[in-house]
Amino acid sequence: ILVAGYLDERNRAKLKEYHAKGIPIAIATDQLDEALVSVQADFTQTGALAAELLSSQLPAGSKILVDAGGVNIRSHFLMAQGFEEYLKAKNAGINYVFVHGYGEEHEQFVRGRVEELLDTDPSIRAMFSVNARGSVLLSEIVRKRGCAGQIRLVGNDLFDENIQSMKDGVMQNIIFKSP
């Protein structure tokens, strides 16, 4: 079985059943211990790349807001970890704040928390999302606030909405992590 994309718990359970029957499984862009092979991006390196991009574009004392996604989603956690490790190792005088939450049930919380932080912390000069959905959300916030170009934005994954955000000057960089 060849699988591409994110696996929810129901799909993971079904694949484990197939594995128990001796059917080989190959997965692209996600991970399952029972898989014969898993092809995916280096998520820790992806987070470090975003930190490197933004820290090279900001003055010391700036802060980066990171939509860090779901704490239980491996790719999100590893990207946030790589981001944090890079900034700590480089000690570039750049601070960061993580906002956690992922999925439709958390979207309003994330939106509200990002808006609150932007309203109360003028040192936030950039934003990064560890996932595609968050990239769209952050772009919407920048557009609504009319601060395109004032807050640097690094998006995640290449798709129509992110491409439009680049064309509109809302987003300055996109990390495309297709394996």
Image (spheres, rainbow, N blue to C red):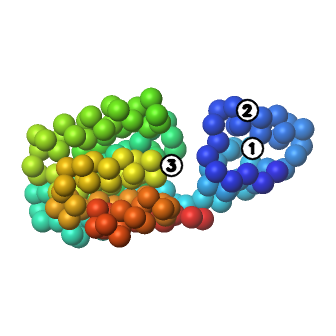
Image: 94 above or below 122: below
Going by the image, does 20 lie left or right of 48? right
Q: Are marks 2 and 3 in contact (CB under 8 Å)?
A: no
| Amino acid carrying mark 3 in the image | Ser
Between circles 1 and 2, the one closer to the viewer is 2
Q: Position of residue 13 (x, y in %)?
A: 73, 32
Q: Nearer the viewer, residue 153 or 65?
A: 153
User: Quadrant of residue 28 in the image?
Assistant: bottom right
User: Quadrant of residue 11 in the image?
Assistant: top right
Q: Are marks 3 and 1 in contact (CB under 8 Å)?
A: no
Comes first in the chain, label 2 or label 3: 2
Q: Quadrant of the C terminus?
A: bottom right
Badge 1 is on which residue? Answer: 34
| Amino acid carrying mark 1 in the image | Glu
Badge 3 is on which residue? Answer: 75
Residue drawn at point x = 40 percent, y = 47 percent:
134
Residue at mark 3 to residue at mark 1: CA–CA distance:
18 Å
Badge 2 is on which residue? Answer: 13
Comes first in the chain, label 1 or label 2: 2
Residue at mark 1 to residue at mark 2: CA–CA distance:
11 Å
Residue at mark 2 to residue at mark 3: CA–CA distance:
19 Å
Q: Please tell me whether mark 1 sits on a helix, a strand or a loop.
A: loop
Q: Please tell me whether mark 3 sits on a helix, a strand or a loop.
A: helix
Q: Position of residue 178 (x, y in %)?
A: 57, 64
| Amino acid carrying mark 2 in the image | Ala
Going by the image, does 22 lie left or right of 80? right
Residue drawn at point x = 69 percent, y = 53 percent:
4
